[in-house]
Image: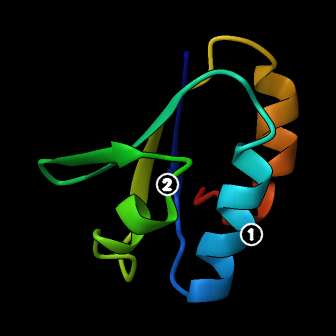
Amino acid sequence: MLTVSILLDSVEKVQRFVSKISRYSCSFDVESGNSFVDGKSLVGLFSLDISRPLQLNGGESEIEDVLRDINEFMQY
């Protein structure tokens, strides 16, 4: 199971993130405080406060590929 902190602080970043994460068949949840949304949903992600780091959870398989694809959004 994958759990990483991501920052999607612009419309363009949200669109790129959804485009990349949608390539995978497994499910992803994005958490902000007490709110959880589908990580593949543009509308869901825009309902969160994208000015702050978010928590990405999910990805039962292909974790290395997912991490490579979302590296630009990850917060270390």
Q: Secondary structure at mark 2?
A: loop
Q: Quadrant of residue 62?
A: top right
Describe residue 69's horizontal placement relative to residue 16 as left or right.
right
Residue shown at 60% from the left, 56% from the top:
76
Residue shown at 17% from the left, 54% from the top:
33
- Whether label 2 touches label 1, CB < 8 Å: no
Describe residue 47's horizontal placement relative to residue 55 as left or right.
left
Question: Where residue 6 is drawn, which disc sits there?
Answer: none
- Identify residue for label 2: 41
Above or below 65: residue 32:
below
Above or below 67: residue 32:
below
Residue shown at 71% from the left, 44% from the top:
22
Please rate how many residues cluster around mark 1, counting C-alpha atoms within 10 Å: few if below 14, some from 14 to 19, many from 20. Answer: some
Describe residue 75's horizontal placement relative to residue 48 as left or right.
right
Please rate how many residues cluster around mark 2, counting C-alpha atoms within 10 Å: few if below 14, some from 14 to 19, many from 20. Answer: some
Residue 47 place in picture, x, y as percent: 28, 70
Q: Amino acid at mark 1?
A: Arg
Q: Which mark sits nearer the N-terminus, 2 or 1?
A: 1
Residue 26 place in picture, x, y as percent: 64, 21
Residue 23 place in picture, x, y as percent: 81, 39
Q: Secondary structure at mark 1?
A: helix
- Identify residue for label 1: 16
Residue 31 place in picture, x, y as percent: 31, 47
Mark pair 2, 1: CA separation: 12 Å
Q: Amino acid at mark 2?
A: Ser
Q: How is the image coloured?
A: rainbow
Instruction: Check the picture and name the quadrant holding the N terminus.
Output: top right
